[in-house]
Structures are given as C-alpha cells and as structure tokens.
Amino acid sequence: MSGVNKNIVILISGSGSNMAAIVETARTQRWQTRFGARVAAVISNKAAAQGLVWAKAQGIATAALDHTAYASREDFDAALMSGIDRHEPGLVVLAGFMRILTPGFVRHYEGRLVNIHPSLLPAFTGLKTHQRAIDMGCRFAGATVHRVTSELDHGEILDQAVVPVMPGDTAETLAARVLTQEHLIYPRAIEALLQKG
Ligand code: GRF
C-alpha cells in the first residue's frame, strides 16, 4: 500500500458479492478509524452489474465503462486507469473483474493491485476452475488472494482457503462452497495489507 493513501477502488463485472463482503468488513472492522482506509469507488466494465446498484445504495461512488465501446484493450485500460486514478487509490482490488488487463495497466498499479481467483493457485489458472478440479478428481479445492503481475493468475499469494470437494459436487455446488470462503479471505487479506501500512 502506498504511503498515507488508503483509498480502495474495487473493480467488478457481476454480482459483486466479494466487493460487498469487503465493504461490510470495512464497516464492521472500522477500517476508516483504524487505518484511514475506505472503499472510495466501485467500477464495472458492465453497466448492468448487480454489484453497482448495491454499492451505489451504500453511498459509494460508482462508474461503468463498457469495454465493447473501445477500439482496443489499451484504449479501454487507459480509460479505466483515469477512472480509477481520480480516486487516488492506494489499493486496486479486482473482485470478479472478468477482463484481462494490459501489461501497462498492471505496471501502473504495481504493488497495489490484488485479485481473488477461485482455485488453489498455482493449480487451475484461468477459467472453469471448479469443473476442472472436479474432472481431475481433486479432493480439495479453494480460493486464492494474490498480487497481480502481468502473468495471468500468478503473483505472490497473500491468502488461501481450502474446501473439500464432495461426492456428487457440480461446478455450481463447489463454486458456492468456495465463494463463502472467498468472502472471508478477501477482506482478511486486505486488512493484513492495511495493517502493514
Ligand atoms: C468469484 O468466484 C471470483 O473468485 C471469480 O469470480 C467470482 C466473482 O463473484 N473471479 P462476485 O462477483 O464477487 O460475487
């Protein structure tokens, strides 16, 4: 986290349940009082993202930037960066943000960019993690909070949670079990970063 600036900007694409868990924890654990940290904005690449409605209702600044309106990934990322930077973030949190980011974007936020991935990294980078874990016969699955580097789903692991894979699990039942753990480890990992200062 950079110096005194503890503004958190969260990027989402969908339901935003991890974002909501972070916002709730910020409130119940008094991040503002303890660390001077607050969720300054929630930004989505999809205007219809449910999470935006929820964030707005909490009084958080929201914005939607439709990636399909930009000619290239670089153009989209440049617009996204200016949308993020107006909130002077100390931490940029990817929470179900379903866009691959350009190396320029990752470099710009180096040291203050984190992600949650629904697998026990380094296993199962990429998509369809739960189905792949079931197909491989894994007995355990989970989620990982990690720093973001230009290599997809790599970067230092900050926190992890493990859940069992149960007989008869589908990708959906396993995803739901993993998601409940995501809601615990993502706020916990962010709080640990805030504590480090
Ligand atoms: C989570 O499982 C996250 O790990 C994955 O996408 C899902 C987002 O869920 N990358 P939500 O939008 O936080 O509810």
Image (cartoon, rainbow, N blue to C red):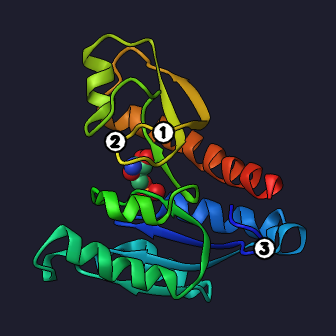
Residue pictured at 31% horizontal, 78% vertical: 78
Residue pictured at 34% horizontal, 73% vertical: 49
Disc number for residue 56: none
Q: How packed is label 3: few (under 14 Cα within 10 Å), some, or many (20 or more)?
A: few
C-alpha separation, residue under disc 1 versus residue under disc 2: 8 Å
Check disc 3 and give the amino acid type: Val
Residue contact at pointers 1 and 2, CB within 8 angstroms:
yes
Say which quarter of the image contains residue 98: bottom left
Residue at label 2? 151
Q: Which badge, 3 or 2, comes first in the chain's sequence? A: 3
Reply above or below: 192 against 125: below
* Residue 134 % position (x, y): 31, 20
Q: How packed is label 1: few (under 14 Cα within 10 Å), some, or many (20 or more)?
A: some
Check disc 1 and give the amino acid type: Gly
Residue 131 in the figure: left or right of residue 39: left
Is label 1 within 8 A of ligand 1 (CB to nearest ligand atom)?
no
Check disc 2 and give the amino acid type: Glu
Secondary structure found at label 3: loop
Residue at label 1? 155
Secondary structure found at label 1: loop
The foreground one among 135 and 32 is: 32
C-alpha separation, residue under disc 3 versus residue under disc 2: 29 Å
Is label 2 within 8 A of ligand 1 (CB to nearest ligand atom)?
no
* Residue 131 % position (x, y): 27, 28
Say which quarter of the image contains residue 88: bottom right
* Residue 12 % position (x, y): 41, 66
Q: Which badge, 3 or 1, comes first in the chain's sequence? A: 3
Disc number for residue 4: 3
